[in-house]
Amino acid sequence: MPDWPAVLAFCAAALVLIVVPGPSVLFTIGRALALGRTAGIVSVAGNTLGTFVLASAAALGVGAIIAASEVAFTIIKLAGAGYLVFLGIQAIMHRKRTGQNATDDAPQPLRRVFAQATIVGVTNPKTLAFFVAVLPQFASAGGAWPIPLQLELFAVIFCVIAFVSDSVWALVAAGARRWFGSSPRRLEVLTATGGAMMIGLGGVLAFARRT
């Protein structure tokens, strides 16, 4: 059995970190504003999967190796930042198409939306740094479970909390989008705003540090 006091302490720490708007929340809001409710929730699911991959890598020790390597960390950082900028530009370029479909979610293939969000999640350097620095602090060497298994449990807990919290943000943002949908012009502006948020987020992550 896991060390339940440590689990509860991690839940509290994870909840505080997740609820406070950060890269994942900004990405979720940007996608929901640009693409609508369904795509927003699918984006949350894809981003959560990418987060779980990073957490699992940290649990297995791979994350620590990457975070310790300036070259590997920089490659992941720039790849994730560049991809966010690309998605933001795409949203801005297609804003008129979104405005023409004001009453419905943007006609994006959900598989593509999910894959895009997964890539964003797995290339988020801030998430990687968090898991490498914070997860081990809640593991107990004398616990009944091996440390990698304890870390994997923390990863699952973090992703469940993140999925629920980010889904709420997606629904709120999508609700605003539908309200703006009464005016195709306003929806175009809102979609462009979502794209600009993703571009800005990409710029912020491009300068992320390992610590």
Image: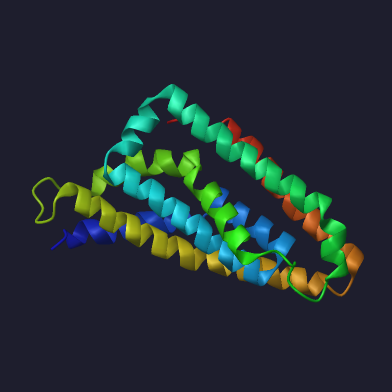
Quick check: 192 left or right of 128?
A: right
Image x and y of residue 39, in percent:
64, 66
Q: Residue at x 40, y 46 (%)?
A: 54
Quick check: 210 left or right of 170?
A: left
Q: Residue at x 56, y 60 (%)?
A: 114
State how many labels appear: 0
Quarter of the figure with the C terminus: top left
| Farthest top residue in view | 70
In this view, 205 is above or below 50: above
In this view, 142 is above or below 189: above
Image x and y of residue 105, in percent:
73, 71
Image x and y of residue 44, in percent:
54, 62
Quick check: 173 left or right of 148?
A: right
* Colouring: rainbow
Q: Residue at x 47, y 64 (%)?
A: 163
In this view, 177 is above or below 112: below
**Foreground residue, 36 or 21?**
36
Image x and y of residue 141, in percent:
12, 45
Quick check: 56 left or right of 20?
A: left
**Foreground residue, 203 or 56?**
56
- Does residue 169 show up? no
Q: Residue at x 52, y 59 (%)?
A: 46
- Does residue 185 show up? yes
Quarter of the figure with the N terminus: bottom left
